Amino acid sequence: MKLSLALGLLSIIGGADAFSTSRSFSPRIKSQLHMATAGSLGCRPIGIGSAAPKTIITNSDLEDVVETSDEWISTRTGISQRRVLQHEETIKGLATDAGKQALEMSGVDPEDIDLVICATSSSDDLFGDATSIAAALGCKNAMGFDLTAACSGFLFSTVTAGQFLNNPSNMKNALVVGADALSRWVDWDDRNSCILFGDGAGAMVLTRDKGSHGVLGYSAHSNGGGYDELNLGYCGSPRMVATPGDGTTLSEGSYKKIAMNGREVYKFATREVPRVLNEALEAADLTVDDVDWLLLHQANIRIMETVASRLGMPMEKVITNLADYGNTSAASIPIALDEAVRSGKVKKGDVIACAGFGAGLSWGSAILRWG
Ligand code: ACO
């Protein structure tokens, strides 16, 4: 099963009262803007893991590919290198490695995982990867599905998993994976975008818990009015099948490359991310002063600096590993969180304000109290 954008699912399981009314957006983007905001989801993270491909492409390597320089890329984005899957490698393999680590840290038996959600926009299989990841991990009692919400995917999947765990269902444990390989879908002749993306996977185990730790509040939005700013659209070629009469012209499937208006996405992110973080903090009944760590989707260091400054937070509180991985889309938040937890930076009880943003357009925030 594959779900496009989490909010449809949230509307089914979260109830209509989870949604507020629409409000206006920038003059460029006029469609309705939907929002889901709520307080504690009654679940907490107990394990985290991540994996990235071995192959590294540095900024200097890219100087041989497009007209660019290490200096331009590092000063404009904060990225030094990215990890990429080679031809025979799979996103499912990375996701499984990340999931294994998260399960080990959690101490949960794979057979006790009830739900596996794989947030991805670049699955190995268009029908979805979650079920094979679950099978590879031995999560034989889990229901699995993919969720597509671009770089907001991990955030939306965490909120979606929380809705299942919080509901009076028999689900107790969920594995949420964020995994992407946008190197497969980048135009390697387009210097505006090919320098940004890398591949990777991260995973988190959530368990039902009504205590004071875990997902304390969230807010999520999407607006298709901004679709043109960032997309990866279908482009089939005509395929005639000889049905009676004149035949039928069907479409043989393939996709274009990532198309992005970097400046507009940049403006959208720096405008909306501080707002969505404040909404989630308010839903969690916290303020910026309560936040120990700010963890944003790793897209551009200048976006992180601007958002931190708009919130009045010092850069020392910003978790970032963008320099080493580039933008790994749905994987970026769990990879950075995994490194921060394993290095001892994030400690039990710390409050982490997370925010994802990207194609759709989509954006969301979740406030976590770790451990
Ligand atoms: N090397 C050298 N020069 C370059 C490169 C490059 N790789 N790319 C662009 N340039 C040039 C441009 O052609 C332009 O030249 P010109 O002034 O002669 O026209 C100049 O540099 C400035 O270009 P801008 O686009 O204005 O550069 P900007 O400072 O905006 O940085 C960037 C571009 C890095 C893409 C930035 O806009 C950005 O980070 N945007 C946000 C992207 C993002 O966050 N995406 C997240 C979502 S991803 C998802 O959801 C899948």
Image (cartoon, grey):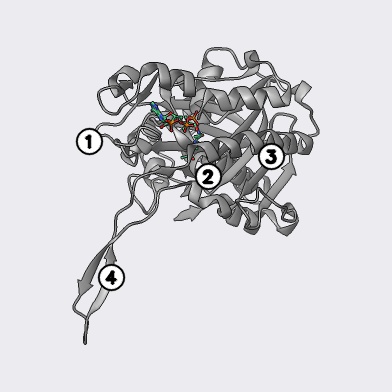
The N terminus sits in image quarter: bottom left
**Circle 2 sits in a helix, a strand or a loop, which is it?**
loop
Residue lying furthest left: 242
Q: Which mark is residue 88?
A: 1
Mark nearest the camera among 2 and 1 is 1
Mark nearest the camera among 4 and 1 is 4
Q: Residue at x 34, y 39 (%)?
A: 186
Asked if the residues shown at circle 3 and circle 4 are in contact, with their CB atoms under 8 angstroms apart, the answer is: no
CA–CA distance in space, label 3 to label 1: 38 Å
Whether residue 201 sits left or right of residue 93 in the image: it is right
x, y (%) of residue 283? 77, 39
Q: Which mark is residue 340?
A: none
Q: Which mark is residue 114?
A: 2
Query: Residue 133's image quarter?
Result: top left
CA–CA distance in space, label 3 to label 2: 22 Å
| Residue that numbered label 3 is attached to | 218
**Circle 1 sits in a helix, a strand or a loop, which is it?**
loop
Disc 2 marks a residue whose amino acid type is: Asp
Asked if the residues shown at circle 4 and circle 2 are in contact, with their CB atoms under 8 angstroms apart, the answer is: no
Disc 1 marks a residue whose amino acid type is: Glu
Q: Please, is residue 161 above or below residue 315 in the view?
A: below
CA–CA distance in space, label 4 to label 2: 39 Å
Asked if the residues shown at circle 2 and circle 1 are in contact, with their CB atoms under 8 angstroms apart, the answer is: no
Query: Residue 210's image quarter?
Result: top right
